[in-house]
Every structure is written in C-alpha cells, then in structure tokens.
C-alpha cells in the first residue's frame, strides 16, 4: 500500500498518520503553511521526546512551540525535518542569544552554542548526550 493511499484512508480515521523510515525516523507527515499542525507537533514529540528539546531542558511538550530550524522568513519549510519543539524560553534563546540549531546526520536536531558559551562550539546532540568537536 502506498504512502499516498495510507494518508487518504487515514483522513477520516481517528488516527494520526506518521510515515516512518526503516530506521524509525519520522519522514513525512504532510506540509502546512507557516504554523506546524497539531499532527506535525505530535510527530516532532514522537521523534524527539515529549519535552523541550533544548539541551538539559525538561519542560513538558505541552509548554513548547514548534521552531523552524531554517527560519520561515529565510525560506524554511513547515516540514518535520525542519522543526523542533522548544519551550518559549529556549525558543527565544535560539532567536536572540546566538545559538544555532540544525538537523544532525541522524535526523535529530543538534545545537551549536555561541562562542561566549563554548569557545570550541562543540555540537550538542541531546538525543545521545554526546559532544562532538567541530572540525
């Protein structure tokens, strides 16, 4: 059964369709406009955990906002591979304090702190809690 047919059948069902890759990474949930849909937010929470994804933060998912990794004004899409759930405090931090968030090679968001936080700007991957030095 194709993904298109599954989405069509799920339209009237009381389920949230999520298309997963072979490794369990959420690949597609549809495309909205500027704001992420509740279904997309659910898929982001499934992918990244039910809390603010910023390193060391555990504010619950219900207190989060969906952030465009490539900002909307810069042409960023409202797609799962361009979204991450952040609490209001950390959403503001990303926009105003020099932090960078990007999609890592494993399909999960990773963070680069500004030089005033870490002069080496080690990449922080909250999903595995490892630090990776920039080349």
Image: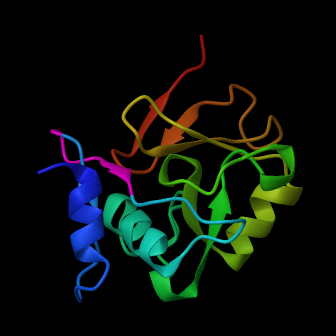
In this view, the residue in front, 98 or 118, is 98
The image quarter in which residue 45 lies: bottom left
Residue 60 is at least partly visible in this image: no
Location of residue 102 by image quarter: top right
Which residue occupies the extreme top position in the image?
135
Depth check, front residue: 51 or 83: 83
Identity of the residue drawn at 46% across and 60% down: 30
Residue 67, position as x, y percentages in the image = 66, 62
Q: Residue at x 86, y 52 (%)?
A: 73
Instruction: Answer with the quarter of the image where residue 106 lies.
Output: top left
Indicate the quadrant containing the C terminus: top left, top right, bottom left or bottom right.
top right
Q: Is residue 112 visible?
A: yes
Question: For this view, does 11 lie left or right of residue 112?
Answer: left
Asked whether 25 falls inside the magenta stretch, the response is yes
Outermost residue on the left side: it is 1
Q: Give the side of residue 115 with respect to residue 49, left or right.
A: right
Q: Nearer the viewer, residue 112 or 83?
A: 83
Q: Is residue 112 left or right of residue 131?
A: right
Place of residue 12 in the rendered image (x, y in percent of width and height, measured from the top left): 28, 85
Relative to 37, say whether 105 is above or below. Answer: above
Q: Position of residue 4 (x, y in %)?
A: 29, 54
The figure's colour scheme reads rainbow
Span shown in magenta: 22-28
Q: Is residue 97 magenta?
A: no
The image shows residue 18, relative to residue 81, as above or below, that is: below
Residue at left offset 44%, top offset 50%:
126
For the image, the number of numbered tags is: 0
- 107 or 76: nearer the viewer: 76
Q: Position of residue 122 (x, y in %)?
A: 60, 30
Position of 68 compared to 103: left or right?
A: right
């Amino acid at each position: 059964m194709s993904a298109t047919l599954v989405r069509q059948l799920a339209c009237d069902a009381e389920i949230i369709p999520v298309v997963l890759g072979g490794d369990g990474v959420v690949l597609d949930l549809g495309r909205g406009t500027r704001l992420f849909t509740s279904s997309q937010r659910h898929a982001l929470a499934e992918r990244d955990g039910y809390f603010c994804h910023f390193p060391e933060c555990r504010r619950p998912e219900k207190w989060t906002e969906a952030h465009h990794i490539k900002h909307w004004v810069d042409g960023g899409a409202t797609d799962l591979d361009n979204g991450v759930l952040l609490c209001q405090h950390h959403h503001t931090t990303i926009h105003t304090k020099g932090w960078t968030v990007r999609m890592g090679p494993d399909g999960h968001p990773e963070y680069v702190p500004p030089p005033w936080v870490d002069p080496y700007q080690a990449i922080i991957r909250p999903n595995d809690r490892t630090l990776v030095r920039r080349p």
